[in-house]
Amino acid sequence: RLSKHYDETFKKALIEQAENEMQLKELERVNIFKNHVLDTLLKVNNLFMNLNDSDDYYHVILSSAIDVIENASKGSILVFNSESNKYEFVTCVGYTLSELQKVTMTLEETFLYINANGDFRKPLIINNIREFDSKFLDKDSNANIENAGGLDIEEALSAPIIIDDQIIAIMNIDSEIKNAYDETDVQLIQYFASQIAIALKNKYLVDETVNMSRFDRLTGAYSRNYFEKVIATQNESTLTNMTSYALVLCDLNYLKIINDSYGHVAGDAILREFSRMIQMNIRDTDVISRIGGDEFVILLKNITAEKAEEKMDAIFEKTRNHTLQYQGHELPVSFSYGIAVSPDDSMVYEILTKIADIRMYKFKEQFKKDNPQVILSINTF
């Protein structure tokens, strides 16, 4: 009896020791994972600070998750596109991205949603990937995923990245091994996704703050303060590379009359339309800024005085009869402009602005003399 008692006690001790060792291994696994998450957040935040392309930090996020999740070998991230209302592949590891990018999905078409049985806001393990592809994807999408390298996947760990109750991205961590993942992996990827969501939300808040300081909220043109920074950089380039640029001061011709006759909502619509109209007709390297109520300035880079005159004359002629429909009325989106060129006229921003301003008002006076009928047409409502 005593021997039997000792045997049972010894077995119990061995079992407890084994369980303790397993718990220690799990704790070690979790700690390693959390340290890896911290390293990933540092990398991602550095990318945020350097204003890198969003695809770069999504790739860092994905690669880090694959590195730390046991048995993971491939993966992809889909990001929600608010314009198409679909999720699109933006990065991957182990696949051909160009093939994946041919596939877009609504939330209801994703692996996560279909396999979640309604609880699609939590990560889950999907162990029937190939069956899913053939059953739920159309023929072309299924072929694209196969061409991308999706035939050898046995299991996937799919996790939503949620910001303000919206799934902004879905991370898929794939394995070529059956039964590759367990409940600990689900908990780990949920922690990872939640930390990434916090980092992304902070980035969006920073971006929003930057945009508010960089852009005029009404028109989408650059703000005055930011434009002055752009000009300072341009002046440095002019000194270093001996290049010239044109400063074009623009003033809307009839904004006060439109505001008085139709209200400021109509005037705001004119301002937005003018900004859009100019942006459609200048190069991507050129810049437009709203510097006052109805005043804008355009920076035409690497251009001579003659070419600047030709450019603005072409824009003016192209848009001189441009109107905006407002409550059954056609309101003119008309402007006057004056050009000053650096270094020909000056290299000092304030002097260039003054020269352009004088030339603009001469243009405006002549334009109004030549077009008196426009004011009459605005006042008839």
Image: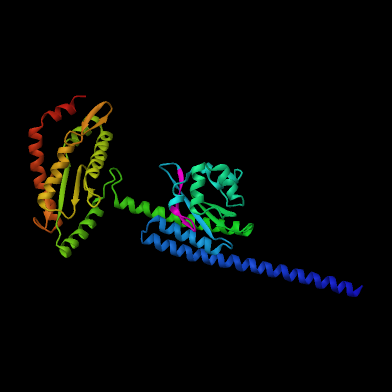
Give the overall secondary structure of the magenta segment. strand
The C terminus - image quarter: top left
Q: Nearer the viewer, residue 327 or 33?
A: 33
Q: Position of residue 140 (x, y in %)?
A: 49, 43
Q: Residue at x 20, y 56 (%)?
A: 231
Q: Position of residue 3 (x, y in %)?
A: 89, 75
Residue 203 appears anywhere in the view? yes
The N terminus - image quarter: bottom right
**Is residue 95 highlighted in magenta?**
yes
Q: Position of residue 332 (x, y in %)?
A: 19, 33
Q: Position of residue 68 (x, y in %)?
A: 55, 64
Residue 165 appears anywhere in the view? no
**Residue sticking out furthest to the top:** 381
**Residue sticking out furthest to the right:** 1
Color style of the picture: rainbow
Q: Is residue 299 above or below residue 47?
A: above
Q: Nearer the viewer, residue 319 or 362?
A: 319
Q: Residue at x 17, y 60 (%)?
A: 235
Q: Which region of the structure is painted magenta?
A: 86-97
Marker count (numbered): 0
Q: Indicate left or right for 338 with 151 as reference.
A: left
Q: Nearer the viewer, residue 12 or 293?
A: 12
